[in-house]
Image (cartoon, rainbow, N blue to C red):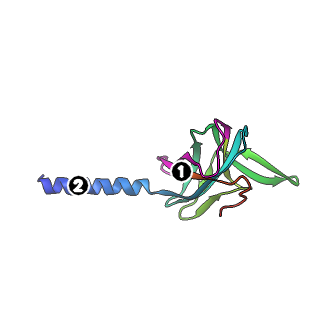
């Protein structure tokens, strides 16, 4: 194989790797600011997957524990609970937002302040059981921020 063909194959492999990494996109990521000594907050974002997938895991270095949670009405009371994942239907925007599915950052290591940037790692699994890790940088918004922008 000549040098030109080797270069073309390397470029093609790189393009495939890049497109494989772009199966899931995240936008509008933000975290609610905390007050001093507060040990928990929420992270919110929009997630879109090219193929059917499932958000399985979340991590952040600012928290001792990060979990996927769901809020819902049950017996006329709003309840929040950890869930094992969130389905990401192909081509559909899934919004993690206050009062619904969201990420809980628990056992915070320090106060998160408006304007800070919080790194969050998402682990998504496709129907083929292949996992993708997505690094997200979520901006910290004011404590009273109820919805995105």
Disc 1 residue crowd, few under 14, some 14–19, many 20+, Cα 10 Å:
some
Residue sitting nearer the eye, 62 or 120? 62
Q: Alpha carbon of mark 1 to alpha carbon of mark 2: how far?
A: 33 Å
Secondary structure at badge 1 equals strand
Q: Which residue is mark 2?
A: 9
Disc 2 residue crowd, few under 14, some 14–19, many 20+, Cα 10 Å:
few
Which residue is located at x 19 percent, y 54 percent? Answer: 7
Which residue is located at x 56 percent, y 38 percent? Answer: 61
> What range is drawn magenta here?
106-135
Mark 1 vs mark 2: which is more N-terminal?
A: 2
Q: Residue furthest left?
A: 2
**How far across and how far down the image is residue 26, in percent?**
53, 57
**How far across and how far down the image is residue 75, in percent?**
87, 52
**How far across and how far down the image is residue 143, in percent?**
72, 52
Q: Residue furthest right?
A: 76
Which residue is located at x 53 percent, y 50 percent? Answer: 136
Q: Which residue is mark 1?
A: 137
Q: Mark 1 against mark 2, which lies toward the viewer?
A: 1
The mark found on residue 54 in the picture is none
Give the overall secondary structure of the magenta segment. strand
Secondary structure at badge 2 equals helix
**How far across and how far down the image is residue 74, in percent?**
83, 52
Residue sitting nearer the eye, 62 or 44? 62
Whether residue 117 is in magenta: the answer is: yes
């Amino acid at each position: 194989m000549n040098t030109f063909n080797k270069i073309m194959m390397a470029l093609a492999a790189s393009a495939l790797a890049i497109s494989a990494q772009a199966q899931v996109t995240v936008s509008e990521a933000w975290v609610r600011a905390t007050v001093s000594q507060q040990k928990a907050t929420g992270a919110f974002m929009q997630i879109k997957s090219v193929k059917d997938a499932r958000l399985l895991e979340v991590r952040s270095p600012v928290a001792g524990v990060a979990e996927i949670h769901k809020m819902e009405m049950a017996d006329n009371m709003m309840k929040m609970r950890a869930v094992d994942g969130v389905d990401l239907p192909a081509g559909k925007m899934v919004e993690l937002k206050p009062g619904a599915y969201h990420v809980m950052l628990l056992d915070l290591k320090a106060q998160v302040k408006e304007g800070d940037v919080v790194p969050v790692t998402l682990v998504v699994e496709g129907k083929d059981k292949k996992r993708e890790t997505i690094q997200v940088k979520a901006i910290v918004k004011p404590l009273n921020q109820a919805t995105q922008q």
